[in-house]
Amino acid sequence: MPFGNTHNNFKLNYKVEDEFPDLSKHNNHMAKLLTKEMYGKIRDKQTPSGFTVDDVIQTGVDNPGHPFIMTVGCVAGDEESYEVFKDLFDPVIADRHNGYKPTDKHKTDLNFENLKGGDDLDPNYVLSSRVRTGRSIKGFTLPPHNSRGERRGIEKLSVEALTSLDGEFKGKYYPLKSMTDAEQEQLINDHFLFDKPVSPLLTCAGMARDWPDGRGIMHNDNKTFLVWVNEEDHLRVISMQKGGNMREVFKRFCVGLQKIEEIFKKHNHGFMWNEHLGYILTCPSNLGTGLRGGVHVKLAKLSTHAKFDEILTRLRLQKRGTGGVDTASVGGVFDISNADRLGSSEVSQVQLVVDGVKLMVEMEKKLEKGEAIDSMIPAQK
Amino acid sequence: MASSFSRILSSKQRIGILSLVGGSVTAGYLLQREHVSAGLPVRRSYPASAEYPDLRKHNNCMASHLTPAIYAKLCDKATPNGYTLDMAIQTGVDNPGHPFIKTVGMVAGDEESYEVFSDLLDPVIRERHNGYDPHTMKHPTDLDASKIHSGNFDSRYVLSSRVRTGRSIRGLSLPPACTRAERREVERVVVDALAGLKDDLAGKYYSLTQMTDSDQQQLIDDHFLFDKPVSPLLTCAGMARDWPDARGIWHNNEKTFLVWVNEEDHTRVISMEKGGNMKRVFERFCKGLKEVERLIQERGWEFMWNEKLGYVLTCPSNLGTGLRAGVHVKLPLMSKDPRLNKILDNLRLQKRGTGGVDTAAVGGVFDISNLDRLGLSEVHLVQTVVDGVNYLIECEKRLEKGQDIKVPPPLKQFK
């Protein structure tokens, strides 16, 4: 919730054990790691904008999680959250990001030329390619915490930046609250329109407040570059196209991001970034690159192979259904993307996708011919 | 014992009066527990005009009355517990409403909200409660069930009778704002008191966090179990936080008196039975409420109540009596009569389906209950339902015999 938090001082009148949440039935990173002692230590803290530990953990308290899927269970309300509440965030980050230490440094590399290959994924198998990330704008608090005034400020700056782009990035901004029916229909058909969040993971963190005020979508005329404003993060930037030319998708992604960043910097509102956590985003799972690079790929045979999941793990990839996170695959078509976000650069993460998908398509072809693939199974990357 | 009891009571009554007079800080100062005075919010980087919500597509009472001027006046204020205007109106901003159904669009986070944000809450209360003006009018409380007459309906028509209300524990924040510790304290205070009930009221508490599967099944079969709220009207106001921590259900052994703990209010109190003996249902209701009040007072607590607003609850629509007295009644012929709605209106009654609010009637069976909550006493409202239902049954009988019915003149409003 925005503004001051005198409510937090009031809570301190109660003992730690009376305020400490009951996490006995919970399965998320926060619940695993938040002890009563830790809670007692950080509960009197606030970020400069008034975000408290209870604000950080509310989503994880309200959503016990699933025995099979480990959600993060905590969010940041602003850039400073990751510092003020490091007692909680550092272990959560280590748990979520493969042992990433508080002293580790994150490498940012948005130089698309460093990507090797990626322009020759077989379009008979790879139906579409996409890279997305998020960006937060310095000087504003994040979606769980920001006020209407801030959110509108973010929108105003973003619209200015995005509508000043030219060349292949030239496009138009559609604010959610004044969209015409025709525009809405078109955006739905293009699969661009994002809905008011219904997932309680997001709503319990306060990210759907005041919907649809300050929210909107910008896309370029070619419909290959898309930016969501004020959904789960300040900005979600997406580059996509049909077919398997991930190289082109990644180039557009990098160039577009750099152009946008220049414009924000000119207004003294660059992106939130530091050399330990990379790009700062609302959910700790998206720290680092915030990048999910993926393809929709036909792997009808490979997906039923006993070693499919192991292959993915070794390639540092993950699978989803074609509806995105938490959906099932349809017709043997999977969404395959990088599993990592923090501790490796954008180039290296997209490289893993490009190399890994190429290998899996070869495996699929082999299986189609009735041949074995055991010799092709890779070592752990 | 008696002197300390009266000292505790009088200090809390004093708070009640002071919070009316003005001074959220004063009210905070006098509460028993150590209190932090309301500070100004820590951060405000935008002027009120930049923060004012876009309510152009909204249809709720808050949106009708929140002008930019009122917003600017109130947006920097906070109650002693730190509850702000933005928090109070969030549910109304997030839920634009429906062209036919006008929701309230705001909630109270604590007792002091009704004072600190009175510039907005007073017009909302006036609109919702037929012109009741908290500044000039007083709300009558009357829980003397002996005054009800003709309260035993023809059970060929009335299938069941029920009276519900809510009660809040003074000194603890309401469900939109309460911390986990406060919510747990509400549970402790209430469960402790309920354990003191005897005879036909003796019963048992079922905590939602520790319920066994078989208890849960039984409570579902009895239609007692309440679910985690899914309505965005409630979730956007923060009432489902930390579910199911400190929530539970208490009921007496005879299953005719039921208390919900920490759902939309601190407590919801329900008296019900099959058949048409509304008088007995109301008698048990009053007796139970008075007993619970006595038991919490013994321990130094009291209900939130004042003479302007009656019983203070989370939603402004439930102020006053917080009372909904109703029956499930079979009126198949009346259900087809085009004059039904007008008759109900004039009798100050409302109809719902038998699933409760926002459901449809099935097989000509309606849920008929009082429309009003504030400005009229419990006895008055229950008698209104009794008289109204008796009239409706008379109409149904006349239609059965092929006779005509009359639309009664509208009932007078406040005295």
Image (tube, rainbow, N blue to C red):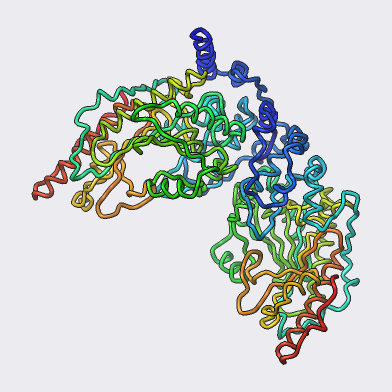
Would you say B379 lies left or right of B103 here?
A: left
Residue B182 horizontal side relative to residue B150, left or right: right
Q: In this view, does B126 lie above or below B161?
A: above
Asked whether A311 or A146 is in front, the reply is A311
Does B151 sit above or below residue A260?
A: above
Q: Nearer the viewer, residue B192 or A247?
A: B192
User: Residue most toward the top?
Assistant: B3
For residue A305, which quarter of the picture? bottom right
Picture quarter containing residue B385?
Answer: top left
Q: In this view, does B238 lie above or below B172?
A: below
Residue drawn 38% across the image and 35% down it: B252
| Viewport quadrant of the C terminus of chain A | bottom right
Can residue B18 be seen in the rendering of this structure? yes
Q: Is residue B96 among the parts visible in the rendering?
A: no
Q: Where is residue B254 in the image (x, y as percent from the top left)?
A: 34, 37
Residue B16 lies, in percent from the top left, at 51, 18
Against A170, residue A367 (above or below) is below
Give the residue at x 86% y 62%.
A344
Farthest-out residue, bottom:
A369
Label count reads 0
